Image (cartoon, rainbow, N blue to C red):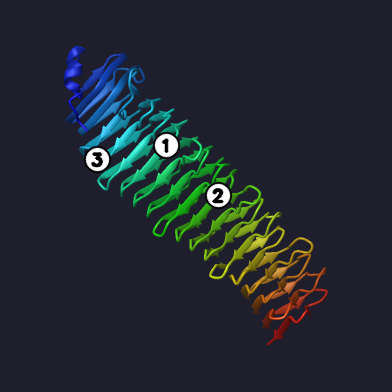
Amino acid sequence: MTNPEMTPFEDFLATRGIQPSSGGIVLPPGFYEIGNVVLDGESVSVRAEHPGTVTFEGSLCLGGNVTFEGITFSPALDEDLLPRMDISQGGTVKILNCHFRGGENAAIALCSGLVEVRDSRFENVRVKTALQVSGECSRLSLERCVLDACMQPLVASSSAYVGMEQCELIGSAEIWPQVVIKTGAQVTLEACHLRDGLSHAVWVKEQGQASITGCTISGFHKAAAISVQDDGSKAILSGTTLREGLRPVYGQDKAMVALAKCELIGSAEKYPQVTMTTGAQVTLEACHLRDGLSNAVWVKEQGQASITGCTISGFHEATAIHAHDDGSKVILSGTILRDGKQQIYGETRAMVALTKCELIGSAEKRPQVTMATGAQVTLEACRLRDGLSHAIWVKERGQASVRGCTISGFHKAAAICAQDTGSHVIMSGTAFSDVGKTQFVCDGGTISNR
């Protein structure tokens, strides 16, 4: 982005009487009002004689192969029209132990090239995104960096790639997610901590891709921590903890989300931990969902969920798994649901399937499994026990197929209840023990034993 107002960096140094040495350009302590300068060279090293004692005020347009070490970058005092660093000509830029402070424009705007940032800090970028990365020829990697009190830490777009490892992102402005991934860009976060933003932690849209491994995400009370939307957009989380927020995960518009070995802790009242709507799909494998003030998983409007080998517990204010609307579906396998108000609720022709699952307990007058308004459930090789209401209740044309299950410990109500004309339960190879009454039908409901 060179323009007539740009000054070559070499000319600026000459005005200060600084000459490159065999060790590169070594700057003595001081404030350097660089204005708008351009630096395009091969194997150029610019470092502070003593880290943290050199401040550049102004903007740099970079190309070639350049390394900065121990420098503080600050906006020009009289104007702030350009990023601290504009990298659009390709090349490689390394930033080591630097500090980007304040300003109303980006700290780094990368359109073409490779940028490596290590042990650096970005703070108080107030108006624009701190890190703007776009273009399929752009790659940004950050290790052990902190982005603090920025309006928005990162936007990746137009097939760019960003990798962050052992970084900390603190805060964001209202309606500004900490990390935005869009138009085919890819971002990987590994062993990072994202916290206390006023919007999403990560927002993926327009075929963006996110990979989140071994991270902690906490304190997002204004919006879903992870929001994924649009067909082709995807977020993959592994070994990650999401806690202390409004809700951990939201998917819509045919987006895809996958969680493996993750822990989801808590959610606000009326906000499920995981919501899939308008055709979005989620898979949860070996995860622990606990202690939310709404549902653990809610699918609606053709949303889909596959839950394998998970533990779901502590949902005392709402049903753990709620499936709503024709075309919505939840498949559970090898999963334990316990210590909650009600385990499964399906309505409005939604479908639920459970295989080799264990359902333990339910609140008084709350069946473990309820199917209403044409919803359907299949249970195969499952164990249902120790609830304070029915094990299975179908009503309003609800349907249930129960095969090879064990049902025990239901003393407050009949284990199986079919109510209303059109409601039906098919039982096959299922054993009852320690129950007050095995089956009850009323108002035209039917139960078949095969």
Label 1, label 3: how many angstroms apart (C-alpha)?
19 Å
Q: Which amino acid is tagged 1?
A: Pro
Dividing the picture into quarters, in which one does residue 145 lie?
A: top left
Instruction: Count up the numbered dots.
Output: 3
Q: Which residue is outermost to the bottom?
A: 450
Q: Are marks 1 and 2 in contact (CB under 8 Å)?
A: no
Instruction: Give the spatial CA distance, label 2 vs label 3.
Output: 34 Å
Residue designated by label 1: 153
Q: Which quarter of the figure has residue 243?
A: top right
On residue 248, the disc is 2
Residue 133, image x, y percentages: 32, 41
Pick the front one: 310 or 343: 343
- State whether residue 22 appears in this view: no
Height in image: 75 above or below 426?
above
The residue closer to the viewer here, 333 or 209, is 209
Taking depth in this image into account, of 174 and 341 the one nearest to the observer is 174
What's the residue at 20%, 15% (across, down)? 18
Q: Amino acid at mark 2?
A: Pro
- CB of mark 2 within 8 Å of CB of mark 3? no
Q: Which is more N-terminal, label 3 or label 2? A: 3
Q: Earlier in the sequence, mark 1 or mark 2?
A: 1
Residue 157 or 392: which is nearer the viewer? Answer: 157
> Is residue 199 at least partly visible in the picture?
yes
Residue on which the image places disc 3: 113
Label 2 Cα neighbours within 10 Å, binned few <14 / some 14-19 / many ≥20? many
